[in-house]
């Protein structure tokens, strides 16, 4: 079977090259499992900022597509400044890849980019993985920050570069319209939570839904005996991106609650730094400073650095306003940490409240902080939640089973499509 992926990452294209920045994300892990399945030929197509060559590595063919506008810094600025749309160019290049690779099935990872529009251009069976749904994230994109305040809060430099949060929000909104088109004429989807199943039913009535889990980065498949968590010291860990809906404001609020109660703690935040726009805007808006609240901003880290941070933490705290199936949350579980998350999106499919983690009423920072304190004072419960979370995560992200799961989905779609034809 010839399978062609359209992804938002290059997977293993740069592996072993000087430009490689690490082991890649969860799709790289899945790629390595899928390519080793008997009778499978895999192709991976992705958007590249510069001209790259098609190439084959082992049994995988890679097809980088040059983004027509963003080959230079000036080009990328023009795209942002004038909100240029280059979907047609990308889709034409994608059709060239399809015609060269001749896939039996196409797998588009995510509804966030334009690849889902290929359904209108070719009759090859196509399935889309649900990741984050833009139309659902749009209402919470700004978190609790008032939109009318953003222009005054944002850095002048980022406004000039058209890379401020308000500009990102406008792009996000435009892409959400495209996403609705994608949902309107695609009929096969892969998801992993009750939340994304309900979204498929809502946005694409009558579509076929398949359950397919994600894989995690290799370094996180570790045994509990390898953890060195200092349970006598309250170290909290959170991984977020540079977006307001990731909940940095909630971290500040909860840290203030803990500090006001004279709780001794250290909160390590991975993924943002003092230079991040969301950090700058949030601290100005809420008049709270991380430096006064025992919060360390660690910036971007490699997978091994993240694994090391998790090994030293007592509790993983998931602060996001909305997530479908957070990879960071799953990596914390499989690393053997007790986790606390707000009950939104697909979190209830990842956490069974009170058994392998704690779910807190959406937006209730006071209760979240209280749960942190309770865990810190109950070592047995902490260990029990961590053990159950790790056990469930190991089952959920089992590499062999997940690979077979996807091959089964591809075969089912091909049979279903041939019956319809």
Image (cartoon, rainbow, N blue to C red):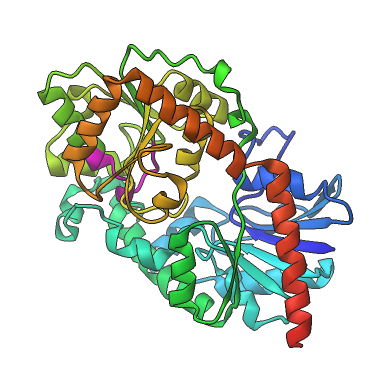
Residue 109 coordinates in the image, percent (x, y): 60, 60
| 370 sits left or right of 96 in the view | left
Above or below for 204 versus 348: below
**Is there any visible trace of residue 78 in the rendered image?**
no
Residue at point 50% right, 78% down? Answer: 204
| 197 sits left or right of 105 in the view | left
* In magenta segment, residue 52: no
Residue 220 coordinates in the image, percent (x, y): 58, 30
The quadrant of the image that shows the N terminus is: bottom right
Above or below for 167 versus 208: above
Q: Which residues are magenta?
A: 239-250
Corner quadrant of residue 340: top left
**Is there any visible trace of residue 304 in the rendered image?**
yes
Residue 357 coordinates in the image, percent (x, y): 39, 37
Q: Camera-side residue: 3 or 94? A: 3
| 211 sits left or right of 341 in the view | right
Callout count: 0
* In magenta segment, residue 241: yes
Corner quadrant of residue 83: bottom left
Residue at point 54% right, 56% down? Answer: 192
Residue at point 69% right, 69% down? Answer: 94
């Amino acid at each position: 079977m010839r399978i062609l992926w359209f992804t938002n990452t290059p997977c293993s294209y740069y592996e072993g090259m000087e430009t490689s920045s690490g082991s890649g994300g969860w799709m790289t892990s899945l790629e390595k499992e899928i390519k080793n399945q008997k009778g499978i030929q895999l192709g991976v197509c992705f958007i590249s900022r510069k001209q790259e060559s098609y190439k084959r590595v082992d049994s995988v063919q890679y097809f980088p597509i040059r983004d027509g506008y963003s080959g230079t810094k000036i080009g990328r600025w023009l795209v942002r400044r004038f909100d240029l749309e280059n979907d047609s160019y990308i889709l034409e290049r994608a059709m060239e890849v399809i015609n060269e690779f001749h896939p039996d099935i196409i797998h588009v990872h995510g509804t966030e980019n334009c690849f889902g529009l290929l359904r209108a251009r070719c009759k090859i069976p196509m399935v889309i993985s649900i990741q984050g749904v833009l139309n659902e994230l749009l209402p919470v994109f700004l978190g609790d920050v008032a939109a009318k305040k953003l222009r005054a809060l944002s850095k002048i430099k980022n406004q000039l570069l058209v890379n401020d949060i308000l500009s990102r929000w406008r792009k996000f909104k435009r892409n959400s319209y495209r996403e609705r088109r994608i949902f309107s004429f695609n009929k096969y989807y892969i998801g992993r939570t009750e939340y994304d199943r309900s979204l498929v039913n809502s946005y694409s009535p009558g579509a076929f839904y398949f359950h397919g889990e994600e894989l995690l980065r290799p370094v996180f498949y570790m045994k509990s005996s390898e953890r060195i968590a200092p349970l006598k010291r309250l170290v909290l860990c959170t991984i977020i991106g540079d977006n307001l809906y990731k909940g940095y404001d909630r971290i500040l609020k909860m840290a203030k609650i803990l500090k006001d109660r004279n709780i001794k703690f250290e909160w390590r935040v991975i993924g943002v730094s003092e230079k991040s726009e969301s950090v700058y805007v949030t601290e100005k808006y809420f008049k709270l400073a991380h430096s006064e609240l025992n919060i360390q901003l660690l910036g971007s880290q490699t997978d091994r650095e993240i694994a090391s941070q998790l090994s030293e933490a007592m509790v993983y705290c998931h602060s996001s306003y909305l997530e479908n199936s957070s990879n960071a949350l799953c990596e914390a579980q499989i690393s053997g940490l007790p986790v606390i998350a707000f009950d939104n999106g697909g979190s209830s499919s990842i956490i069974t409240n009170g058994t392998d983690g704690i779910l807190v009423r959406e937006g209730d920072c006071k209760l979240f902080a209280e749960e942190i304190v309770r865990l810190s004072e109950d070592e047995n419960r902490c260990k029990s939640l961590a053990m159950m979370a790790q056990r469930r995560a190991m089952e959920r992200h089992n590499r062999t089973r997940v690979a077979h799961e996807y091959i089964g989905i591809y075969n089912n779609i091909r049979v279903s499509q041939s019956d319809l034809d």
